[in-house]
Image (cartoon, rainbow, N blue to C red):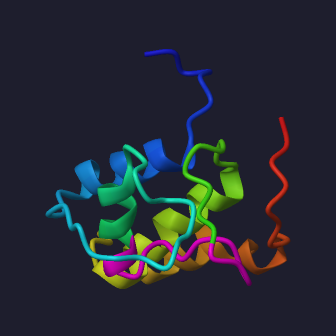
Amino acid sequence: MDPNHKITRGEMARMMVEILGLPVQNEATPFSDLAGNSYESYVATLYSYGVIHGDAGSDKIRPNDTINRAEAFTLAKNAVENLKYATISETDMQSLTKDLDKIENTTKIED
């Protein structure tokens, strides 16, 4: 595994589903760019649990685009909040997320 390899949003969805041990779902999603994608069921799984929402104001998920740190952190935060998998104290969670609201919601992916 190359630790410097950039991962796609679809790959991140698959890793999250597998790490969290979620049963894979094949439910419909509102994402117009997901049909037939190899990560469709993983994105659908996270969507069904309220972990992934796609691009704000859009019906896109962009499964083949790379994911940035803010997007990855948002997925992790949503998983903790929505799935109650957190084993972290409330104080530690507040410390980790205190500046999250300062991260600009953007769809631009920077290298």
> Is 78 situated above or below 39?
below
Residue 104 horizontal side relative to residue 48, left or right: right
> Is 71 situated above or below 5?
below
Give whichever of 48, 33 is nearer the camera: 33
Residue 77 horizontal side relative to residue 14, left or right: right
Instruction: Please check the rendered image and state whether residue 110 is part of the magenta-colored stretch, yes or no.
Output: no
Counting every numbered tag in the picture gives 0
Most extreme residue toward the top is: 2
- Location of the N terminus (image quadrant): top left
Range covered by the magenta-colored residues: 47-59
Residue 76 horizontal side relative to residue 103, left or right: left
Q: Position of residue 79 (x, y in %)?
A: 39, 71
Q: Quadrant of residue 95?
A: bottom right
> Is 14 situated above or below 6?
below
Q: Quadrant of residue 101?
A: bottom right
Which residue sits at x=37%, y=43%? 38
Q: Quadrant of residue 40?
A: bottom left
Instruction: Please check the rendered image and state whether residue 54 is part of the magenta-colored stretch, yes or no.
Output: yes
Give whichever of 17, 42 is nearer the camera: 42
Give whichever of 100, 90 is nearer the camera: 100
Q: Position of residue 106 (x, y in %)?
A: 83, 66
> Is 82 situated above or below 68?
below
Which residue sits at x=58%, y=68%? 74
Which residue sits at x=68%, y=72%? 55
Which residue sits at x=26%, y=75%? 27
Give whichever of 14, 40 is nearer the camera: 40
**Is residue 89 among the parts visible in the rendering?**
no
- Location of the C terminus (image quadrant): top right
Dominant secondary structure, magenta: loop
**Is residue 46 among the parts visible in the rendering?**
yes
